[in-house]
Amino acid sequence: MKSTAVATFVLFGIASAASLPGQPSYGSKKRACCPAEIALATGIHLNINGQYSEFNTTQKIEDAEKAHPDGPSTQIYELIGQLQANVQGGQNLRLFARTHETSQQIAPAGNPAIPGLAMYAAAEETEKAQANTALNGNCAHDKATLELLKQEITKGIALNQANLKAAVSECDFNLVFPPENEMGV
C-alpha cells in the first residue's frame, strides 16, 4: 500500500512536470507525444541553438576579417575552425539517436516534419561545404560566402522552427525548452 502511494506520487509528479499548465504547446492536443516525437523535437530545438552558434560565429569571422584586411590572422583561422565544428555539431545532432540514423528516421512514420527535415539535411551539407572549402581568411575573398552563409543559416533557423512545430503538431507537446540563442552562445 505504501509503495503504491509512493509510485502514484512519483508518476503524478512526473506527469505534472511534463505537462505544465499555461505553457506554450504545439499542435492540436490530440494525444500525448510518443518518445520518438519528444526526441525529435528535442533534437530539432538543440539544432536551432546550434544554428544560432553558426550564425554568430559567421558574424565573428566577418568582423575579424574586416579588422584584418591585409590577410588572415590566427584568430580568423580559429573562428573558421569553430564554424566548421559548429556545422559538424549540427550534423551530429541529426544522428544522435543511433549511429547512421537521421532525424527523418527518428520521426514516426508520416510525421509532418519529415519533408522539412530532408530539406534541412540537404542545406546542412551545402553549409558544410562552404565552411570547409570556400573560406580562406581573406576578407575580399570570403565576403560573399559569409553573407550567403548568414542568409542560409537564417533560412535554416526558420525552417527548423517550422520543423519543430510540425514534429509535434499531432500531439500535445508541453515541454518547455530554454529560449533559443541563449544556450552557450
Image: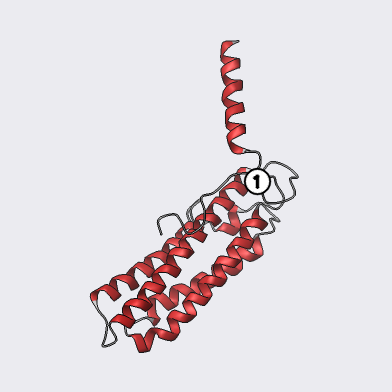
From the viewer's perspective, tell me whether residue 98 is left or right of residue 114. left
Can you say whether 185 is above or below 123 in the image?
above
Q: Which residue lies at the image location 49% right of the left edge and 72% below the top edge? A: 125
Determine crowd level at label 1: few under 14, some 14-19, many 20+ residues with C-alpha closer than 10 A: many
What's under tag 1, amino acid-wise? Phe
Q: Which residue lies at the image location 64% right of the left edge and 62% below the top edge? A: 162
From the viewer's perspective, tell me whether residue 63 is left or right of residue 123. left
Can you say whether 126 is above or below 173 in the image?
below
Give the color scheme: rainbow, by chain, secondary structure or one colour.
secondary structure
Seen from this angle, which residue lies furthest top?
1
State the quadrant of the N terminus: top right
Can you say whether 118 is above or below 64 in the image?
above
Residue tagged 1: 173
Can you say whether 82 is above or below 95 in the image?
below
Seen from this angle, which residue lies furthest left?
74
From the viewer's perspective, tell me whether residue 104 is left or right of residue 49. right
Please count the marks in the image. 1
**Picture coordinates of residue 103, whole percent (x, y):** 56, 57
**Picture coordinates of residue 116, whole percent (x, y):** 63, 65
User: Residue 6: which quarter of the image?
Assistant: top right
User: Residue 185: which quarter of the image?
Assistant: bottom left
From the viewer's perspective, tell me whether residue 110 is left or right of residue 18. right
Q: Which residue lies at the image location 45% right of the left edge and 59% below the top edge? A: 92
**Picture coordinates of residue 65, whole percent (x, y):** 32, 81
Under circle 1, the secondary element is: loop
Q: Which residue lies at the image location 41% right of the left edge and 73% below the top edge? A: 58
